[in-house]
Image (spheres, grey):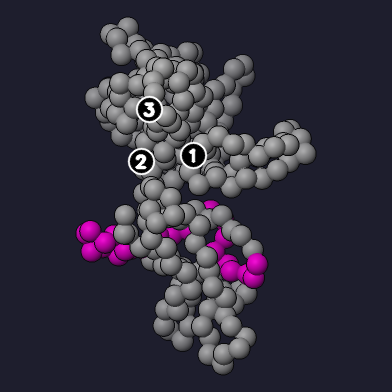
Amino acid sequence: MGDEVAFYTKEASEHLIVGHGLYGKTNSGEYGPIDIYGDSLLTPEKDGASTGDILNVKVLLKDRCIEYFPELISGSNVWSVDTQEISDWGNIPIKNKIPLHSGWNLVSFGVNKCFYVGKKPDVFMIQNIEYEAVNSINDILKSIEGYYTYVRGFDSTGAKTYNQTPYSDMSYMAAGYGYWIRIKDHNDGTIYLEVEGRKVPEDTHISLLPGWNLVGYLGNRVYYKGIKPQVPICCNPIYMPVENISN
């Protein structure tokens, strides 16, 4: 907590800061929504963003005294009045905290990682995924160690299982895929699977093969019909009502 992100425009060769956020201030493990302040019509000088201004980002890693300027990956960085924009910027690490309850949970994560044991998997992966070698599947699930009993996945080679025995045949977990995780009965309330990495743009394509596919969900938009969901949902969700789920 304490790392900073600033949005700025360029005015007369000087940086005009128009938005600012602190990591973890709104939601643990995230920067959260950041307000961009517009130019006031009551002052002669430019003191905020104007319609059409291009927004840039600067990040300060406080503990290491490092500043860097991430690049826009998807979305828009052109500001306009009274709009909400979801944009993805490169080089900003995030942490997905995925809530899990007792019993079976169908989950996926939105960080750009393929964690694998042994050799890299020779199956479909989303574009530009980052590979990270681990000693075991349990290393990926360290945040829920002692709570889970089974993990099940599925790809073009068939179903895979990890149950903490030598007979397990799951060798990777990756963004773009979905996983069933079974959590033991316990009295500790909601627990969280934590996965860290770079955010995957929500418009990333996921290839589907003939037959069954178990795929992940990217982004933080929650589409719902009827009553807004009242359960814990990962990653600073944005709720969007729809008339039909098929929409």
| Range of magenta residues | 59-82
On the rendered image, what quadrant is the N terminus found in?
bottom left
Please state which of residues 134 and 205 is positioned toward the viewer in this rendering.
134
Quarter-of-image position of residue 79 = bottom right
Please tell me whether residue 75 belongs to the stretch shown in magenta.
yes
Q: Residue at x 47, y 69 (%)?
A: 19
Say which quarter of the image contains residue 43: bottom right
As drawn, the residue found furthest toward the right would be 243
Residue ID at (42%, 63%): 21
Q: Is label 1 in a helix, a strand or a loop?
A: loop
Q: Secondary structure at mark 3?
A: loop
Give the residue at mark 2: 196
- C-alpha separation, residue under disc 2 versus residue under disc 1: 13 Å
With respect to residue 56, does 93 lie above or below?
above
Q: Amino acid at mark 2?
A: Glu
Mark 1, residues whose alpha carbon is within 10 Å: few (<14), some, or many (≥20)?
some
Closest to the observer: 56 or 228? 228
